[in-house]
Image (spheres, helix red, strand yellow):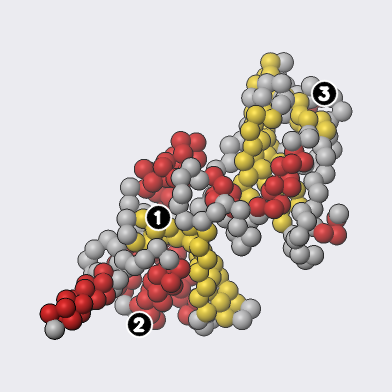
Amino acid sequence: MRKAWMAVGVALIILAFCSNTVGLQAPLECPDKPAGLKKLIQDILKAEKDGNKQKLKEYWEGLRLPNSDQWFGQVFGDRFGPPMAKTYTAESQIVGKTLDKTLTNVLRDKMTQIDVLRFDKACDSQAGNGVYPLLVARKQEQAMYEVKLANGTYWTELFAFVYVDGSFRYIPQPRIPQFRTSVRSTNNTPSNDGDGSGDSDDSGFTPAAITHQVAPIFPQGIGQSLTDSVRVNVLLGVDGGIKEMYPIAGQCAFVDAFQKAIKKWTFSPGKMNGTPYESWFLVSEDFTRSAR
């Protein structure tokens, strides 16, 4: 009998741990799994439907990312972390308002189907155009979640949720920052002037330019109807050579195909009064089956 009471006590403790903890920053502390996040979304929708403003306020507070500067630095490193943390700090002030509006529309349109995707590995076939660049930019393992609420042809997505300090937190539409010095589209005709001097202006500034490019190959094993718009940031050295590159937007297979093509391109470096300098260069490609 004593063992039975002990078992009941443990069960009650677990139940309390996974239930709403009013007044604490973490409104729902459940396992770091899709089922845990789905339960949280269901509870928030119920509070929204009931018009329970106090409970919703607790949820919004609990969804805030604690120690955000430190977290972004740890997960995305010294280059991406600080600007992402700055953006989050500004946007986190209105998370409650934006989520409240979104969920009001969800209830109005009866989007009762809730699907939760968990992304662990970078190259995930379900990771969309804005998700893959984040996954590949991580410096340490951190699962990221996407919630899709749907009703037939009506649907909306909430990205990204992360599990930090025993609870789910919400980062509204995180993006990898784009560093820019010179921005050109890959659809531009490559310059015939190797040093790009034909594009210089009165200030003596000459932007970097593409001097030769190779078309990317459409990825194998991709559905006929699937398309993607890929953007990649490229750091050019003083000699015009590629020093590094990272994706801003695009799905894994398409980004990989585009980066393989970019490695075969040549560039003229940016110059100031004839002196070359390192510069960031944004290149893009729209993948369509019909164009191949």
What residue is drawn where x is 50% and y is 75%? 114
Of labels 1 and 2, earlier in sequence is 2
Q: Where on the picture, by quarter, is residue 13?
A: bottom left
Give the crowd class for mark 3: few <14, some 14-19, many >=20 residues within 10 Å.
Answer: some
Q: Are marks 1 and 3 in contact (CB under 8 Å)?
A: no
Q: Could you give the CA–CA distance between mark 2 and mark 3, rounded to whole angstroms?
A: 66 Å
Q: Amino acid at mark 3?
A: Gly
Q: Amino acid at mark 2?
A: Asp
Secondary structure type for disc 2: helix
- Which sits in the foreground, 2 or 247? 2
Residue 239 place in picture, x, y as percent: 71, 21
Q: Where on the picture, by quarter, is residue 4?
A: bottom left
Left or right: where does residue 193 sit relative to residue 174? right
> Would you place residue 81 above or below residue 193 in this image?
below
Give the crowd class for mark 2: few <14, some 14-19, many >=20 residues within 10 Å.
Answer: few
Which residue position is annotated with label 2? 50
Residue 243 place in picture, x, y as percent: 65, 29
Q: Amino acid at mark 1?
A: Ser
> Would you place residue 238 above or below residue 216 in this image?
above
**What is the count of numbered marks?**
3
Q: Which mark is residue 194?
A: 3
Q: Which mark is residue 92?
A: 1
Q: Where on the picture, by quarter, is residue 210?
A: top right
